[in-house]
Image (tube, helix red, strand yellow):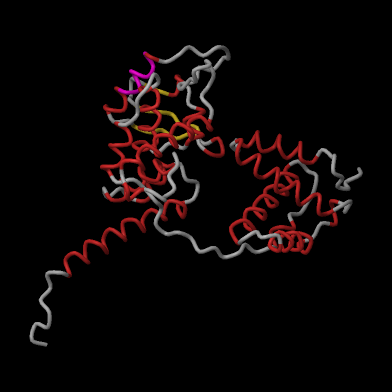
Amino acid sequence: MDTRFTYDDDFLELFDTWMKDQGFTKRTQQAYLGDVRLFLTSLGEKELSTIEAIDIMRFLTKMRQGGAGDAARNRYLSSIRTFFSALIELQMVKNNPSIAVKKSKVEKNSVPTFLSEELLSVFLQSIEGKYQIRNVAMFLLMSYAGLRVSELHRLNISDFNRGTNSLMVLGKGRKWRVIPLPSEIVHVLERALVERLEARSGSEQPFFVSQFGRRISIRMIQSIAEKQFEQLKGQYMELQGKSFSSHKLRHTFATMQVLAGTDIRTLQELLGHASIQTTQIYTHVGDKQKQEAMNRVSAFIPVGMGI
């Protein structure tokens, strides 16, 4: 079998099919395909079986010279690793040369940005318009149930169990999790179903439908949130210059859970994180709150005390 890379070969198509089967989001698929396309183009006609770690290092160095930082370098490497994992599973190669390439150390922001309870309430109450109930329901599920944008997009009516007041959520890697819902959210979801537009076609019945009768897109959800955040910035000067997106609502949910004392394992289950390390970034939020509390107490400590 001819396993040389050429610009118009079938490897990208195979990789794309594999990612779809694995449940990768469309956004991730597009990002990984773009990264791998750059990598394959840099190799010319090098045979598949002769790809080595040094080839990947040369590509990553070239990307650095083009202005890519540590985070971008790691994303390129992650894309290439996933690509070779797919090829191994598809029995196209036997080894993954990218395993020998180390990731760059990236200074992470230990405290994710989130909305205060007051601002979250204002955000939700500011939602108006023809599709008010639908939009409130979507953002309630993000900020009080921790759903991702992609999970809202995939949600079907059949995933809402009115008997148990719970939601079946299809997360990353096609993994399901059950989210018990507060009665307040159940009430809003029921109202959203009453006002929901009928979907035009398809065997599945999406929970959230666009004005065109189709499953609401990820981009539309993000766009609606961005519009609401812009309005919020106009009311609160302290928010101006800060970046907010729909994903900040999920951060807000996780932060509220930490501050309420939810244990890390339970939070991991609620968020649908494969690794507990991903969940642990939110524990630093609690640490920050503790430090601020102690700083407030320090104002009352007598100076000197005769020592």
At x 39%, y 16%, the residue is: 193
Q: Nearer the viewer, residue 205 or 106?
A: 106
Return the residue found at the far right: 2
- Residue 269's place in the image compared with 185, above or below, is below
Q: Position of residue 254 (x, y in %)?
A: 36, 46
Image quadrant in which you'd find residue 269 = top left
Side of 197 where 287 appears, left or right: left
Task: Determine if the magenta segment contains residue 191.
Answer: yes
143 vs 36: above or below: above
Q: Is residue 274 magenta?
A: no
Residue 270 appears in the rendering: no
Quadrant of residue 253 within the rendered picture: top left
The extreme left residue here reads 306
Left or right? Give the position of 193 relative to 55: left
Please tell me which residue is depicted at 28% across the width and 50% down the height of the picture.
Answer: 259
What predominant SS class does the magenta segment belong to? Answer: helix
Please indicate whether residue 123 sits to the left or right of residue 296 in the image: right
**Residue extent of the magenta highlight:** 188-194
Residue 86 visible within the image: yes
Front in this rendered view, residue 213 or 253: 213
Count all numbered tags in the image, as a single digit. Answer: 0
Question: Which quarter of the rendered picture does the N terminus lie within?
Answer: top right
Please tell me whether residue 121 is drawn above or below residue 257 in the rendered image.
above
Image location (x, y in percent) of residue 277: 46, 55
